[in-house]
Image (cartoon, rainbow, N blue to C red):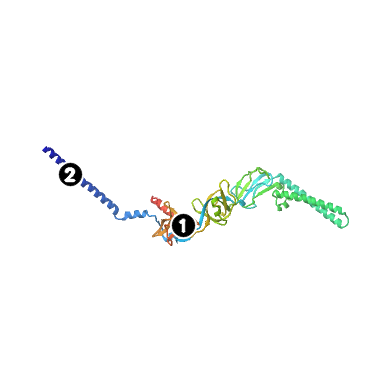
Amino acid sequence: MTQRLTLQATISALAILLAACGADETSRVEVQHADQHSQDETGDGHNRAVTEEDHADIVRLTEQAATEAGIIVEKATPGPMRQTLSLPAEIRFDGDRVARVSPKISGIITRLYANEGDTVARGDTLARITSRELASLKATWLNAETRRSLAAKALTREEQLWADKITSEADVQAARAGYEAAKAASDAAENELHAAGVSHSALAGIANADDGDNSNAYLTAPISGMVVQRAVTLGETVSAGDAGANTLFTILDDSVVWADIAVYKQDISRIRTGAPVSLKADDGQTITEAVVAFVLPVIDESSRTATARVIVDNPDGHLRAGQFITAEIGVGGQGDVLRVPQDAVQTVEEWPSVFVPVDGGFEPRPVTIGANSGGFVEIRSGLSEEEPFVSSGAFTLKAQLEKDAFGDGHAH
């Protein structure tokens, strides 16, 4: 019994000793870790400072570099923002600036002067048609002109004889009737030539034309523009007046286009002729500013929408028929709000932001935006009145910020 008690006491003492040793070792380990952590945090103070600066979302630019990059800083000020209605729109050709050219005389295409993609001026030659029908019409007109000329001379002679009391009045009347008939035949032949595309000035050259020239008809461009379709080949036979035949050439003048806006039934009463319109691309960028030309008084049965048409100048051809865009139509006014140019707001880290000047450069500032109209965006929070911000060149700063982030291997 005494031996068992002694053994138990010994075991308990050993357990206490081992626990103490373990605690001391753990403490030493914890102290070492703490010392190492403290050393990593403090060190000489340079590593931590560099890391923070490397991750700062600041575009470092000197004042001179910012000026050279086109960066403009202004103070945020309030301004009027009109109420707008955002509706879908489609770009269409101006119906008065599309020409579909068909032959005015039947014949064979013996030469082509224009291809698809060519820019032509009004009156330029598109194709040459060799036509027996045209040669026959010119021959008929020449014969009619000859008879008219002879009838005119006969009438003059009879009138002179009547004045000299040599001929009878009946002979004069007969000569006059013959002249009128010849003139009518000549006029009819001339009109047929005009219908075949022969101009009045070209009539004088028919009698003296070289062999074969009187069978040649020339297809000309009725408007200036680009040849967007050519549906004829060399040697092809073409027919005039054939409603089922293809148009030989289609010419488009896209310097002016239509933007047809689909106006929902409940919004028709809010749209007015002359209302300002901002046409925007898919990315929200403003393409151009215009006004509503008119609202068609018809509602489409299938879509239940009316059409508000905007006539848009398109000198650079950046708007193309069939392109879908968004139209923001001004439907009223509202009080002044804090606003900035639309291009001043850039998406940084998935947040709308404006760049503000800071020491040594520019920093993106997240903002809450509101209405977007007339090239301006309402700022509801994140920027204060009279606070400086980058009004022009924000996209450049964003690009530089992303470039710097990519170069560091980080995504800001």
Residue 138: x and y in percent read: 73, 48
Tag 1–tag 2 contact (CB < 8 Å): no
Q: Quadrant of the N terminus?
A: top left
Identify the element where label 1 is drawn. Answer: strand
Bin the neighbour count of mark 1 within 10 Å (Cα to Cα): few under 14, some 14-19, many 20 and up: many
Residue tagged 1: 378
Numbered circle sitting on residue 16: 2
Residue 96: x and y in percent read: 62, 52
Bin the neighbour count of mark 2 within 10 Å (Cα to Cα): few under 14, some 14-19, many 20 and up: few
Front position in the image: 210 or 233 = 233
The three-letter code of the residue at mark 2 reads Ile
Front position in the image: 259 or 88 = 88
Residue 393 in view here: no
Numbered circle sitting on residue 223: none
Which one is closest to the eye, mark 1 or mark 2?
1
Find residue 52 and report its image quarter. Answer: bottom left
Identify the element where label 2 is drawn. Answer: helix
Residue at 11% from the left image edge and 38% from the top image edge:
3
The three-letter code of the residue at mark 1 reads Glu
